[in-house]
Amino acid sequence: MAQKTIIASVVILSVFACFAQAADNELHGSVDLQYLSKFVWRGLDVYDDKSATQASVTLDLWGTGFGTQIHSSRANSDGFENSEWLRYYFFYDNVLWPDERCQTNYRLGYYYYNFPDNPDQNVDAQEVHLALAWPKALVEGLVPSYVLVKMWPSHSDSLIGAKSPLGGTASGFAHIFMLDYGWTVTCPFTNEPRVINLHSETVFNDGVGPQGQNIDHDWTNVMFGASTDFNLSSNMVFTPAVYYQIVMDKSCVAAGGDLDKTEFWATANLKIKF
């Protein structure tokens, strides 16, 4: 019932938003298509070194700060036919103390994680999070941010709850600490300035095993990434990126199915804005 309610809500909201766009042309959003050489989610290699294709539709609701998104992820290899992810996302963005040194950008968000090929929502989960960023706190271009995550199973007696065969649950907190820097360089081919977006993050997992794994209460991973945007047109952006990760906790390595404690992967994203 919960899955049907979420899907119906998203469909109704999307249809309503489309009518609103036709009426006053104030609705905006984007469509993203992404290829990933690996799908690494909060330190876990979800498809065990296999590539994935992801797609999402994001709607910004009339400039109010409210938005919604539908996101799909599927492995490109055999053996993962029942591992498709569907994420339904609702969020609110706003700013505290704008233009001050202590300016704080924040987002309140809610995720519903649906695995449609698993019956009775046995591994479905929900999440609320608060994301904070301070764009003016440090030197120009250097932005620290923090995300507090609370996750729980959609059903307490599901395979990621009380009936977990692996001994863990999807109930708990996670703390994500991030640092971003926009590094401006001169392109050797065009002699024009280009911004390289450098990203780093580390995660403290307070026992959340999203697929029922028994994850330790510990620091799990450190990740570094670099990306840049290529504007193909006024409403189309292509973004390649590379990432490197060090896994610091054995329970997460086992959960990801990879005994190597490091991960390297690349992504390519095409965003179409409207």
Image (cartoon, helix red, strand yellow):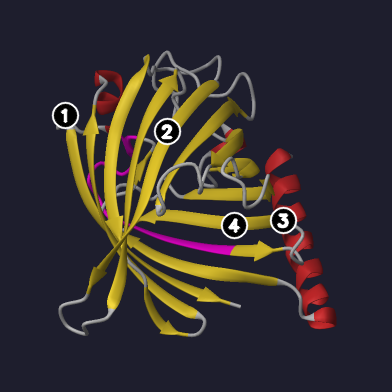
Question: Disc 3, disc 2: CB below 8 Å?
Answer: no
Q: Residues within 10 Å of mark 2 (few under 14, many from 20)?
A: some
Among numbered discs 1 and 2, the one appearing first in the sequence: 2
Cα separation, mark 3 vs mark 2, equals 23 Å
Of the pair 35 and 147, the residue shown nearer to us? 147
Nearer the observer: mark 1 or 2; the answer is 2
Q: What is the spatial separation of the Cα atoms under label 2 and label 4, in whole angstroms?
A: 25 Å
User: How crowded is the residue under tag 3: few (<14 C-alpha within 10 Å), some, or many (20+)?
Assistant: few
Dot 1, how many residues are within 10 Å of its Cα: few (below 14), some (14-19), or many (20+)? few
At label 4, which amino acid type do we have?
A: Ile
Image coordinates of residue 242 in percent, x first then y, are: 24, 56
As for residue 147 lying within the magenta part, the answer is no
For the N terminus, the quadrant is top right
Q: What residue is pinned by disc 4?
A: 70
Q: Is residue 135 above or below residue 214?
A: below
Alpha carbon separation for disc pair 4 and 3: 17 Å
Q: Which residue is mark 3?
A: 65
Q: Which region shows up in magenta?
A: 43-57
Q: Are marks 1 and 2 in contact (CB under 8 Å)?
A: no
Of the two numbered discs 2 and 4 on the same chain, state the one appearing first in sequence.
4
Instruction: Nearest to the eye among marks 3 and 1: give it.
Output: 3
Give the residue type that dot 2 points to: Phe
Q: Earlier in the sequence, mark 3 or mark 2?
A: 3
119 displayed left or right of 261: right
Question: In the rendering, at what x and y percent does residue 35 appear?
Answer: 33, 63
Residue 135 vs residue 43, the one in the foreground: 135
Q: Position of residue 106 (x, y in %)?
A: 62, 43
Label whose residue precedes the other's in the sequence (4 or 3): 3
Give the residue number, with chain letter if any, for mark 2.
177
Q: Could you tell me which secondary element the residue under label 3 belongs to?
A: loop
